[in-house]
Each structure stands twice: as C-alpha cells, then as structure tokens.
Amino acid sequence: MSDNTWAVLLAGEVHPTERLRGQMAGARVVAADAGLAHAEALGVAPELIIGDFDSAVPELLERHGALPRQVHPVAKDMTDGHLAIEHALKQGAKRLLLVGALGGARSDHAVMHLLQLADLARRGVSAMASTGREEAWGLAPGEHVIDLPEGATFSLLGFADLHDVHLSGARWPLVGETLPLGHSRPVSNVAEGPLKLCIGRGHGVLLASLEE
C-alpha cells in the first residue's frame, strides 16, 4: 500500500477485527481528537493528531505527548474529523479509510460522515468507513467493485434518486433500475461474492453489516 492511502481515526465505534487491521495495513494514519483512543487497540501509530482537544482524554494525550499536534479553536466551521480528512487530501491521499466514523454517541457526526463519503466519491477519492463490524462505501456515478464477505447484508442508500443502477454479485441483482429517494427496496440485500455496481446518476453510500 502506498502513501496515497490514509486512515483517519475518528471517535465513533471501533472493533479491531482482522479484516479492519488488514484494510489499514501500510496506510498513513492521522487521528482526529478523541479518535486517538483507537490507535493502541488497532496497533497503529498516528503521525499527527488534529483537533480542538475538547474530547480526548487528558491521560491519553499525556501518554502520546511526543505526537505532533495541529491545534484548532473550539469555535470553528469544521469538525475535527473533517479537518483530518482535508489534511490527508492535501498530503495526496487518493484512498481514505474512516475508522470510527459510524456509531458512537453523536448521530449527527455519523450521518455527516456518510455524506462525506458520498462527497469524496464525487471528488474522485475512493473512500470507505468502518467500525470493524460495519462498513460504508461512498458512491458516485460510474462503476464500483466492493469486496464484501459472502453472506454480508448490505443496503444502497441514495442521497437523491439513484438512476440506471446495475448490481451483480448479490442475491437480488438490479438491471438498469431507478431507486427513489427514501424507498426501502434497496435495503437488506445479501452479498454472494464481490459486488459489481454501476450508477448512471446520483450519489449515496453502500452500508454493509459484516458477519462476525
């Protein structure tokens, strides 16, 4: 894996599974404030921590006192996670793994991370989020191949109508379908191998629950 792959540690739910560790192998790592708490469990060493430091545990910051910090004011117009993502992009990231972007105490942050995945896909950046037990992938018009474990349940969630959708490798394939915003039809499909997905128009995410 090259320097073009970055893992961003966020403050949501994380389960350090072998799949997640493998996805992070060789990636450069940046932590967003309280996301630093996941570094030790995942066995990774962030090269930088970014944020306003209003949520990271003081004892944890003290233990990582030698870690470079990029400090921002509490009163700002971006979340700590957004700042960490933009830092990675400025360093040349072409692939992003948002670790701890889902779950946690802040539903607004989790939803924003899903929206950011779609925006990153729109910008041509391959981006996914993972807790270790759940994954989300940003979707933009074009072709996507997503390697999920066989039997994993997944849903296509559009942030607008999704047009001309083709899907194979799933129990219920799609051929040139339009998926209306808010319709439950594309929810709870099942992977039968690597998913091949093509979207003609629209943005969204693919959200998958992994078998333990």
Image: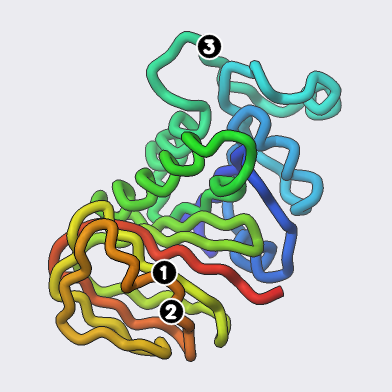
- The answer to whether the residue labelled 3 contacts the one labelled 2, judged by CB atoms less than 8 Å apart, is no
Q: Which residue is mark 3?
A: 74
Image quadrant holding the N terminus, namely: bottom right
Disc 1 marks which residue?
A: 155
For residue 55, which quarter of the picture? Answer: top right
In the image, is 17 to the left or to the right of 48? right
Q: Residue 101: x percent and y percent?
A: 55, 46
Residue 189 marker: 2
Marks 2 & 1, CB-CB < 8 Å contact: yes
Q: Is residue 183 left or right of residue 92?
A: left
Mark-to-mark CA distance, 2 and 1: 6 Å
What residue is rendered at 69% in x and 51% in y? 14
Q: Is residue 56 above or below residue 151?
A: above
Q: Position of residue 2 (x, y in %)?
A: 50, 60
What residue do we see at 48% from left, 84% from top? 191
What's the CA distance linking mark 3 and mark 2?
41 Å
Which quarter of the picture shows residue 105? top right
Q: Earlier in the sequence, mark 2 or mark 1?
A: 1
Query: On screen, 11 above or below 57?
Result: below
SS label for mark 1: strand
Q: Residue at x 38, y 50 (%)?
A: 117
What residue type is disc 1 on? Ser
As drawn, 173 above or below 121: below
Which element carries disc 2, helix, strand or loop?
Answer: strand
Residue closest to the eye, 76 or 180: 180
- Mark 2 belongs to which amino acid? Asn
User: Tag 3: residue type?
Assistant: Val
Looking at this view, is 123 or 29 the one in front? 123
Q: What residue do we see at 85% from left, 27% from top?
A: 63
